[in-house]
Image (tube, rainbow, N blue to C red):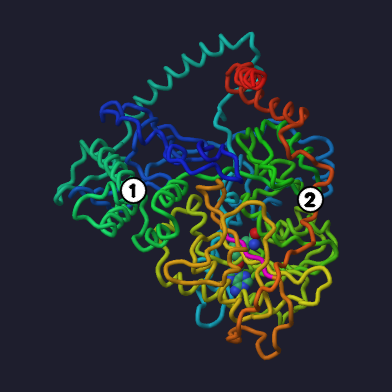
């Protein structure tokens, strides 16, 4: 499992601070080439190569300049080649609890692989020896499966689902090779074990050297071309130096832009500095110039840098408790017993658990197969929380596959009322059905229309969720290809589809609903074209709706103006989420209240009236609360001794497994308690 942001909490932000977003390893001195080549290139269990400490590596991993991409720094062209890596699956060590076994029998999931095939949350071919493949096709929308209006038939190929990475990857422990004997470690044998570890480390180093001699490492190195000549020998050193220089120049330019009147270079305009900065960002992070500029323009320069940096590290792995089947406390207990280190995701959610480490693949535990949880990015909870579905309502989830949000809605409704879960992509809709079954959802009808056909298919809903297909600029950390594969055309096609879908969503709601009359629009993209512009368009075309508060406790206000465009002032009710400020996927959430019926002639795609936006005479708030998701679970705070003890037990077990002294946990705490006592 990766480090860094994976381990940071999600939610309310700390003040922006460069030391927080700049990985320290980049600032460390560059090691000499000779030494570097001697180090073993070990693989992490997730198949990614481990990053050497304190080095700017020349390989293309996690967002550094990518394979085949050329950058040019000070006249030196550098071509990157991807490193090969190997990943090893891990053996699940514990048997399911008897209760769960009963539940599994009931669910007929004894053939784990068979069941998992229906599970879109796990996209990998194999997790821990449990075959879960067969759903990879869900990760990308096949173009002809997507139904759109004739003009934009292939937009579905761009569709990004913010939870996709979680479905592709399992959750592996870093210390997968540890034997059972190590697991039983006690204070008494720590010394013996640490000696044994030293010996093992020495052996590993020798093996690594031997392996290096045998391997054709040229294939793993960057190719450096200077004036058309390929230089191999000195490549890593030059490249590292160049990358370091590039980074230095980025930070220096930002410093100048921060205080331009004092620090500006004479004769060099702000625009020139910005152009240079953008070029450097493209070269350093591997973005197309087009996308880099679009994203850069969302923020002041220093914050833009933080955003680009955050896209280089994965967000924490989060699971959502399925309250139709269990309570968070029970689930946490079961997973801790299996060797998972976790914590509640934050006070804003009663169902999320952030996973720090796991001895078992989380996509194949008995609890997972029994539908006790789903792997879901924390930000994906937000649109459903904003929707605030109520028991006994009729809800439409317009673009529902693979069902992360549908199953959340069902849980909040406690399986009452009725959900129409629709997706235009048949393959993905099958995955949606798999999840609905696994999670014990019983109030849902799955359908397979283009959402543009609503409300003609069926209308009159109390609430509608449109989690729209989007470009995925909020989830670049999961899908680095977004950096280079989005073009200007995409930012015309996608917003066009999103606008039409949003009108259909509005027209599908019953404005006279006694409990609702709400529409939530969300994307996992941060571009203004896919968010504020779409919402503003809907306000103009449907004067019978207004934006209302999302009711979410954190998030940055949406733009009311951007790059010369002015939006309706109520856009300040919308919320933006960024990886650098909340350590969650980039997301956008808007909530509308429908006050009157859409004029008959306007219902249907493309029928937008050019009306005036309803004046906001009074602030409207959805009085219907977000149903308390887990009433029996107050495992949300960190103040209760029981919870603290519970979490610490898991941490101690984890340290023990690593051969570390679990008592080390007490030290910082004592200091903290002492500090508190002093105060
Ligand atoms: C962001 S994903 C939805 C993720 C889902 N809400 C969840 O939480 O699991 C967008 C979905 O929109 C679907 N889609 C794209 N175009 C559509 C259309 N015209 N009508 C209905 N669904 C569409 C895609 O197949 C994709 O599954």
How far across and how far down the image is residue 299, in percent? 44, 56
Residue at 53% x, 67% y: name it: 560
Q: Quadrant of the C terminus?
A: top right
Please tell me the numbered disc located at residue 629. 2
**Few, some or many C-alpha atoms within 10 Å of disc 2 (few <14, some 14-19, many ≥20)?**
many
Q: Is residue 388 magenta?
A: no
How far across and how far down the image is residue 187, in percent? 64, 11
Give the residue at the far bottom of this rendering: 601
Residue at 73% x, 32% y: name it: 639
Can residue 145 be seen in the rendering of this structure?
Answer: no
Q: Nearer the viewer, residue 510 or 316?
A: 510
Q: Name above or below for residue 635 compared with residue 563.
A: above
Look at mark 1 in the image and give the residue it sits on: 259
Residue at 64% x, 50% y: name it: 376
Q: Is residue 591 magenta?
A: yes
Can residue 301 be seen in the rendering of this structure?
Answer: yes
Q: Quadrant of the N terminus?
A: top right
**Few, some or many C-alpha atoms within 10 Å of disc 1 (few <14, some 14-19, many ≥20)?**
few
Q: Secondary structure at mark 1?
A: loop
Please state if 489 lies on the left or on the right of 1 as rendered: left
Please tell me the numbered disc located at residue 128. none
Q: Secondary structure at mark 2?
A: loop
Magenta residues, dominant SS class:
strand
In this view, the mark in front (1 or 2): 1
Q: Exactly how many numbered labels are in the figure?
A: 2
User: In the picture, residue 657 is in which quadrant?
Assistant: top right
How far across and how far down the image is residue 49, in percent? 43, 37
Q: Nearer the viewer, residue 295 or 559?
A: 559
Magenta stretch, residue numbers: 588-592
Q: Name above or below for residue 613 compared with residue 218.
A: below
- Mark 1–mark 2 distance (CA, rounded to whole Å): 48 Å
């Amino acid at each position: 499992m990766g480090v860094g942001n994976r381990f940071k909490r999600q939610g309310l932000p700390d003040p922006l601070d460069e030391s927080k977003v700049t990985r320290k390893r980049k600032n460390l001195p560059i090691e000499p080439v000779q030494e570097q080549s001697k180090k073993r290139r070990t693989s992490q269990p997730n198949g990614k190569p481990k990053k050497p400490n304190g080095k700017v590596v020349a390989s293309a991993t996690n967002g550094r300049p990518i394979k085949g991409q050329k950058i040019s720094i000070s006249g030196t062209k550098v071509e990157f080649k991807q490193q090969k890596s190997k990943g090893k699956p891990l053996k699940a060590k514990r048997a399911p609890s008897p209760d769960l076994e009963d539940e599994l029998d009931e669910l007929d999931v004894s053939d784990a692989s068979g069941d998992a095939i229906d599970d879109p949350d796990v996209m990998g071919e194999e997790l821990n020896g449990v075959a879960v493949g067969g759903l990879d096709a869900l990760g990308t929308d096949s173009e002809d499966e997507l139904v759109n209006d004739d003009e934009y038939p292939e937009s579905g190929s761009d569709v990004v689902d913010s939870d996709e990475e979680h479905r592709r990857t399992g959750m592996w422990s870093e210390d997968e090779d540890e034997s059972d004997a190590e697991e039983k470690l006690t204070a008494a044998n720590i010394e013996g074990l640490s000696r044994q570890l030293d010996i093992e480390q020495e052996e590993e180093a020798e093996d690594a050297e031997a392996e290096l001699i045998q391997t054709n490492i040229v294939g793993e190195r960057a190719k450096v071309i200077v004036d058309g000549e390929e230089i191999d020998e000195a490549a890593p050193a030059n490249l590292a130096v160049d990358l370091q220089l590039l980074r230095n120049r980025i930070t220096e330019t930002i410093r100048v832009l921060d205080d331009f009147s004092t620090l500006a270079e004479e004769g060099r305009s702000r625009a020139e500095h910005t152009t240079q900065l953008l070029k450097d960002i493209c070269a350093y992070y591997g973005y197309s110039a087009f996308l880099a500029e679009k994203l850069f323009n969302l923020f002041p320069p220093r914050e833009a840098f933080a955003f680009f940096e955050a896209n280089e590290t994965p967000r924490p792995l989060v699971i959502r408790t399925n309250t139709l089947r269990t309570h968070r406390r029970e689930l946490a207990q079961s997973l801790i017993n299996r060797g998972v280190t976790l914590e509640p995701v934050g006070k804003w959610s009663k169902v999320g658990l952030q996973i720090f480490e796991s001895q078992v693949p989380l996509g194949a535990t008995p609890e997972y197969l029994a539908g006790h949880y789903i792997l879901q990015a924390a930000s994906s909870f937000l649109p459903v929380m904003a929707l605030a579905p109520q028991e006994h309502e009729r809800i439409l989830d317009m673009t529902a596959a693979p069902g992360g949000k549908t199953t959340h809605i069902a849980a909040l409704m406690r399986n009452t009322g009725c959900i129409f879960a629709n997706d235009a992509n048949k393959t993905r809709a099958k995955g949606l059905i798999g999840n609905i079954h696994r999670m014990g959802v019983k109030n849902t009808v799955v359908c397979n229309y283009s959402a543009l056909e609503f409300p003609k298919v069926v209308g009159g809903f109390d609430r509608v969720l449109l989690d729209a297909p989007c470009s995925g600029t909020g989830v670049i950390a999961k899908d680095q290809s977004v950096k280079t594969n989005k073009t200007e055309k995409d930012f015309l096609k996608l917003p066009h589809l999103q606008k039409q879908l949003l009108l259909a969503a509005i027209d599908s709601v019953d404005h006279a609903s006694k409990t609702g009359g709400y529409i939530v629009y969300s994307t996992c993209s941060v571009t203004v074209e896919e968010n504020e512009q779409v919402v503003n368009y809907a306000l103009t075309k449907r004067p019978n709706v207004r934006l209302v508060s999302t009711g979410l406790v954190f998030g940055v206000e949406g733009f009311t103006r951007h790059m010369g465009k002015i939006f309706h002032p109520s856009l300040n009710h919308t919320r933006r989420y960024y990886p650098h400020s909340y350590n969650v996927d980039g997301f956008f959430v808007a909530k509308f209240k429908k006050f009157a019926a859409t004029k008959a002639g306007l219902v249907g795609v493309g029928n937008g009236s050019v009306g005036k936006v309803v004046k906001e005479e009074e602030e409207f708030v959805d009085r219907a609360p977000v149903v308390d998701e887990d009433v029996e679970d107050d495992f949300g705070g960190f103040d209760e001794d029981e919870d603290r003890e519970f979490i610490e037990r898991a941490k101690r077990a984890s340290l023990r497994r690593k051969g570390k002294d679990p008592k080390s946990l007490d030290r910082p705490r004592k200091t903290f308690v002492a500090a508190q006592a002093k105060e």
